[in-house]
Amino acid sequence: MGLNVRLLRESFELVLEREPNITHRFYGILFSRYPQVKPLFGRNSQAQQEKMLAEALAAVIDKLEDASWLEEKLMAMGAKHVDYGVTDEMYPWVADALISALGEAAGADWTPEHHKAWTDALNAIASLMIRGAKQYGRPEAAAGAGAQASS
C-alpha cells in the first residue's frame, strides 16, 4: 500500500490521548457536512455506531502491515456496506470528516504530512471496500452504487 505506518500510528495515538471519543466528533462533522448520509445510520444507536467505528479504526491501525488481513476484512466490510445503502461517492465524504476530526483533535501538532498519510490510508481503505462491494455485495446494489457515483 505504501502507507506511512509510523506516522499513522503516532498520530492516531496522539488523537486518542487528546480525544478518546474521536468517533463522536467524526459523526458530528459527517452529519453536519453530509446530512444525506444520516438515514443510513438507523440500524444502531449513535453510541453503538461510534464504538464499532472506533474498534474498526483501531484494528486497521494495528494491522497496517498485514495486507492480506486488510484486504479480507475491508473487502468484506465494503460488501456489507452495500446493504446499508453506501455508494462509492460517500467514501470521500467519510475521509473528509475523519481527517477533519483527527486534525481538530491533534490541533497544532497536525501537519501536512499527517494529512497526506491519512488521505493515502483512507483512499486505500475506500478502494478495498469499494472493490469488496462490487465483488461480494449484491450485484444489483453494487451496480446501482457504481451508476450513482462519479468516482
Image: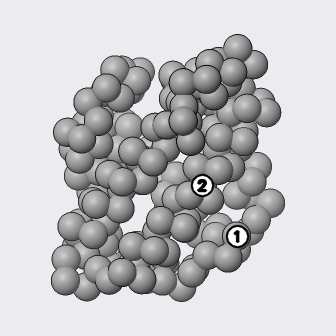
Q: Quadrant of residue 99?
A: bottom left
Identified by mark 2, the residue type is: Ile
Number of numbered discs: 2
Q: Determine the residue located farthest toward the front in the rendered image.
A: 150
Q: Quadrant of residue 49?
A: top left
Label 2 sits on residue:
125
| Quadrant containing the N terminus in the rendered view | bottom right
Q: Residue at x 68, y 49 (%)?
A: 128
Identified by mark 1, the residue type is: Met
Q: Confirm whether residue 71 shows in the render.
A: yes
Q: Are marks 1 and 2 in contact (CB under 8 Å)?
A: no
| Quadrant containing the C terminus in the rendered view | top right
x then y, percent, for residue 47: 30, 38
Q: Quadrant of residue 13?
A: bottom left
144 relative to 111 in the view: left or right: right
40 relative to 57 in the view: left or right: left
Binning the other alpha carbons within 10 Å of mark 2 as few (below 14), some (14 to 19) or many (20 upward) gives many
Q: Relative to 131, does residue 15 appear above or below in the rendering? A: below
Q: Nearer the viewer, residue 103 or 10?
A: 103
Q: Residue at x 35, y 29 (%)?
A: 37
Q: Confirm whether residue 23 shows in the render.
A: no
x then y, percent, for residue 62: 58, 69
Marks 1 and 2 sit apart, C-alpha to C-alpha, by 10 Å
x then y, percent, for residue 84: 52, 23
18 relative to 49 in the view: left or right: left
Binning the other alpha carbons within 10 Å of mark 1 as few (below 14), some (14 to 19) or many (20 upward) gives few
Label 1 sits on residue:
1
Helix or strand or loop: what does disc 1 sit on?
A: loop
Q: Relative to 87, does residue 131 appear above or below in the rendering? A: below
Helix or strand or loop: what does disc 2 sit on?
A: helix
Q: Residue at x 54, y 31 (%)?
A: 149
x then y, percent, for residue 72: 76, 49
